[in-house]
Image (spheres, helix red, strand yellow):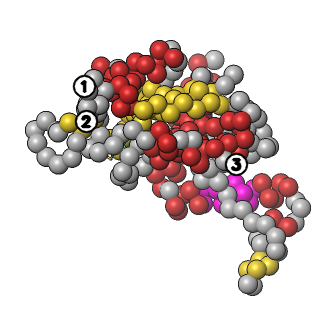
Amino acid sequence: MTFAATVLTLYPEMFPGPLGVSLAGRAMREGKWAMDAVQIRDFAIDKHKTVDDTPAGGGAGMVLRVDVLAKAVDHALEAHPGCPVIAMTPRGKPLTQARVRELAEGPGVIVLCGRFEGFDERIFEGRAVEEVSVGDIVLSGGECAALMLLDACIRLLPGVMGAPSSGHEESFENGLLEYPHYTRPAEWEGRAIPEVLRSGDHAKIAEWRKRRSEDDTRLRRPDLWERHNGARVQSASGAQREVQDD
Ligand code: SAH
């Protein structure tokens, strides 16, 4: 099945952009995913093809019109009924690897890219549009955020990445950061690769990697570590309850 990416944007020429090269580009040429970049301006209602207007209540910048956005979303949904619609916005729910994995297992995604001050809020009330953020930063438009989201999905599609197992040990897949990597030369500017990684003892290597993954997550991302531990405590007490019920 081909994963169908539809991007609604004022700058369709930005796509596929970086997704046209390397693994994603090859996968696209092999038909594992397809891309349709749709010009939002084509859904403008007036003869001047206006897509934005001044913010109600005053203030700087321009806001994307809800009537134009709705027409663009409806058009995309007609071609891909039931496809999730995601708007890129710093006000959205932070994107996670878990959500990316769900999307990659589905039929595709319709991505709405904002510009200027963003979207008229009523689009989220009038249509089933999920608001997603790619981080606590402000971009000038949703296109780079859309490329990030699509890149993360595409690399998970069957047959896109070389080794099928390599996606599963990655950072965030188990709620932790991945352990650090090393390769030749064995020594560089007086720095050696950790001895254990050259020992050939697979059990010891696995243990070292697990410990580094946990230590690094605890030190670098206390937020992830807390969530990971919370999940562990919860599943342990869940398991306990099951035993008691028996
Ligand atoms: N006024 C808005 C920012 C608009 S930035 C605010 O303060 O919330 C213009 C567009 O860039 C947004 O509509 C959105 O599509 C995109 N964008 C900016 N930052 C983003 C982020 N962190 N995640 C996803 N999209 C983002």
- Residue 126 is a magenta residue: no
Of pointers 3 and 1, the one earlier in the residue sequence: 3
**The quarter of the displayed image where residue 74 is located:** top left
**Residue that extends furthest to the right in the rendered view of this protein:** 200
Q: Which residue is mark 1?
A: 46
- Give left or right: position of 115 versus 8: left
Q: Which residue is mark 3?
A: 22
**Are discs 2 and 1 less than 8 Å apart at CB?**
no
**Are discs 2 and 3 less than 8 Å apart at CB?**
no
Q: Quadrant of the C terminus?
A: top right
- Asked if residue 228 can be seen in this view, the reply is no
* Residue type marked 1: Asp
Near mark 3 (Cα within 10 A), the count class, few <14, some 14-19 or many ≥20, is few
In the depicted structure, whether residue 81 falls above or below residue 13: above
Position in image of residue 62 (x %, y %): 22, 42
Q: Label 3 vs label 1: CA separation? A: 41 Å
**Residue that extends furthest to the bottom in the rendered view of this protein:** 190
Q: Which residue is mark 2?
A: 52
Q: Say which of marks 2 and 1 sits in front.
A: 1
Position in image of residue 64 (x %, y %): 28, 35
Q: Quadrant of the N terminus?
A: top right
Q: Secondary structure at mark 3?
A: helix
Q: Which residues are magenta?
A: 207-215
* Residue at the image position 50 percent from the left and 45 percent from the top: 14
Q: Secondary structure at mark 2?
A: strand
Position in image of residue 144 (x %, y %): 47, 47
In the depicted structure, whether residue 99 falls above or below residue 181: above
**The quarter of the displayed image where residue 207 is located:** bottom right
- Residue 209 is a magenta residue: yes
* Residue at the image position 70 percent from the left and 30 percent from the top: 32
Q: Secondary structure at mark 1?
A: loop
* Residue at the image position 29 percent from the left and 40 percent from the top: 118
